Image (spheres, rainbow, N blue to C red):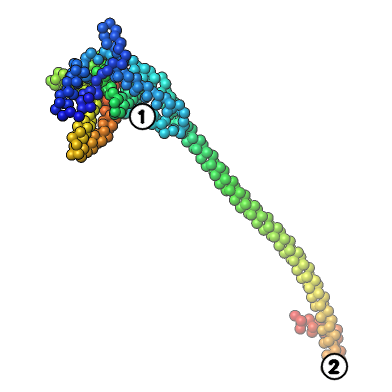
Amino acid sequence: MAGTTTEGHAVIAEAAAEHGAGFPPFDATTFASQLLWLAITFGIFYWIMKNVAMPRLAGILEDRKDRIAGDLSEANRLKEETDAAIAAYEQALTEARNKAHGIAHDTRAKLKAEQDARREKAEAELGEKLKAAEAHIAGIKTEALSQIEEIAGDTTSALVEQLIGKAPTKTDLTKALKSAMN
Amino acid sequence: MANDPIHQFQIQKIFPIEVGGMDFSFTNSSLFMVLTVAATSAFLIFSTSGRGLVPSRVQSVSEMMYEFVASTLRSSAGTEGMRFFPLVFSLFMFVLVANLFGMFPYFFTITSHIIVTFALAMLVIMTVIIYGFMKNGMKFLKLFVPSGVPGALIPLVTLIEVISFLSRPISLSVRLFANMLAGHITLKVFSGFVVSLSAMGAVGVFGSILPLGMTVALTALEFLVAFLQAYVFTVLTCMYLNDAIHPSH
């Protein structure tokens, strides 16, 4: 390696020789070529982007958006279905409960009616029996009372005969008995 | 040649072509334009060839690029601006890949030449002007007369607006060109120091650690700049296109 100074000089000289017009970005002789090739390459690039790459990307993103939207609406639909099923179940449950209440109520009413009817019947029967018994008792009582006079007459006449040795007359006896029994 | 930071920007003819006294040679610059276009197109097309509903890794990179540019354009130029999406996307991808290609050693950086960035900037500005007049007619000139300015100030403000409009292609192209140029020169200078210092023996080799560290750090910075400048170029393009669509601001 040579000394730094000589190397530096060499570099500058070489650079100057090669650059010619100086600073490369300001070298106007290269402008035409750069502009032409930029126009060609950027034009092709623009065409490819516009007609191939971007529609494809847009398509992919669109598909994904649609898919997500579709999935979301499907999920919503399923949720609605679930809600409807739950509502139907609730309704069925309420109906069943009401029906059960109805049946219980009906049964209770029927049983009560039956019971009432039976009781009424029994009561009526009992009343009739009671009446018959009362009538029977009344009959017996009347009979007994009708015989009392005769027995009382006989007894009284026997007693009087024992006391005074002489049987009372029928007329006196009847009179005396009547006054005593009333 | 190793220490000349300018040499990397030298245009070299590969196939000399001359038409009517004009030099249209296929140069190293042309070669890298072709490579940029071919690599970017190939990547975007092959990465999306699966058309996966669930994207593969490369496909998601392409999708990210697409949606990134789409959201940038939509946020500054609105839905109407989406008609320029192919242009904006092409510009972004072209500038980004050209910048990143420049980061490879021995690769030519096409965006480090003012004529290329200026041509791209003029493409944007001409699109703005032509579409602006096509869509709005003479109302496009309202762009230079902001509403709500007091009468006496209108000539002054209009003058400023015209100057600012005319300086747009210059600022757009110079920003990208200067960033790429300066970055590559700086990188080359620092890496040149490493070579020069290590030629000076043991002390020099030890001392070259410093510029080497700088070179590594600058390389990282340059990757950031490569992306950032492509993004800035795109954002400004979107804003200028917005002017063509909605001239009265």
Q: Does the rendering let one see residue A68?
A: yes
Rendered residue at 17%/28% (across/down): A2
The chain letter under disc 1 is B
In this picture, residue A118 sits left or right of residue B137: right
Residue type at mark 2: give it. Answer: Gln
The chain letter under disc 2 is A
Q: Within 10 Å of the Cα at label 2, are there few (<14), some (14-19), or many (20+) other Cα atoms?
A: few
A170 and A123: which is toward the camera: A123
B226 and A51: which is toward the camera: B226
Residue B115 place in picture, x, y as percent? 24, 18
| B217 up-or-down from B17: above or below | below
To which residue does mark 1 refer?
B65
Within the image, what quadrant is residue B71 found in? top left
Within the image, what quadrant is residue B114 found in? top left
Residue B14 place in picture, x, y as percent? 31, 16
Please determine if labels 2 and 1 lie on a single subunit.
no
To which residue does mark 2 refer?
A162
Q: Label 2's element?
A: helix
Residue B130 place in picture, x, y as percent? 28, 14
